[in-house]
Image (cartoon, rainbow, N blue to C red):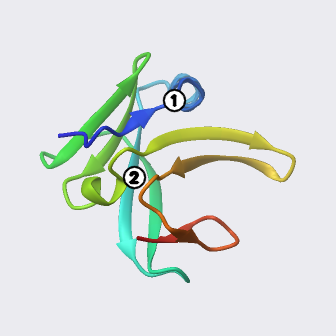
Amino acid sequence: MSHNITLTASAAKHLNHLSAEAGHPVMLRVTVEGGGCSGFQYVLDLTDSAAPEDSQITNDGATALVDDVSAPLMAGSMIDYVEELVGSQFKILNPLAVASCGCGTSFAL
């Protein structure tokens, strides 16, 4: 179950680019862990395989993975890829987050 989590076109394009560079499909694994300065934090990793408990969120041939423990904490979220003056990164836009830290990697529900 994906909990209405979406992968934006920008994130899909970047994942497809990373896959082309690697010479094989890569997926973005998004996990929510306790910690960070606001209570929860995202952990993002590239992987070659999905686990049985992963929800697979796809767009344009690209895939993001969210485990069944993290998915409810990310319900309604968009997984995006942004290019900003300070750098480029995958970014989670989570409507459940009521607060976040200055660096944007941790959040509170």
Q: Position of residue 64 (x, y in %)?
A: 38, 38
Q: Quadrant of the N terminus?
A: top left
Residue situated furthest top in the rendering: 60
Q: Is residue 77 above or below residue 40?
A: above
Q: Position of residue 67 (x, y in %)?
A: 24, 53
Q: Are marks 1 and 2 in contact (CB under 8 Å)?
A: no
Residue situated furthest right in the rendering: 85
Q: Quadrant of the C terminus?
A: bottom left
Q: Is residue 64 above or below residue 94?
A: above
Q: Earlier in the sequence, mark 1 or mark 2?
A: 1
Regarding mark 1 in the picture, which secondary structure is present there? loop
| Mark 1: few/some/many CA within 10 Å (<14, 14-19, 20+) | some
Residue 30: assigned label: 2
Regarding mark 2 in the picture, which secondary structure is present there? strand
Residue 48 visible in rendering: yes
* Residue nearest the observer in this picture, 103 or 23: 103
Horizontally, residue 86 falls left or right of residue 42, namely right
Horizontally, residue 96 falls left or right of residue 57, namely right
Q: Nearer the viewer, mark 1 or mark 2?
A: 1
Q: Position of residue 65 (x, y in %)?
A: 32, 43
* Picture residue at 46% right of the left edge, 52% below the top: 95
| Mark 2: few/some/many CA within 10 Å (<14, 14-19, 20+) | many
Q: Position of residue 13 (x, y in %)?
A: 57, 23
What's the CA distance linking mark 1 and mark 2? 14 Å
* Residue nearest the observer in this picture, 90 or 77: 77
* Picture residue at 40% right of the left edge, 27% below the top: 25
Residue 50 visible in rendering: no
Q: Is residue 89 above or below residue 20?
A: below
* Picture residue at 68% right of the left edge, 69% below the top: 103
Residue identified by numbered label 1: 8
Q: Amino acid at mark 1?
A: Thr
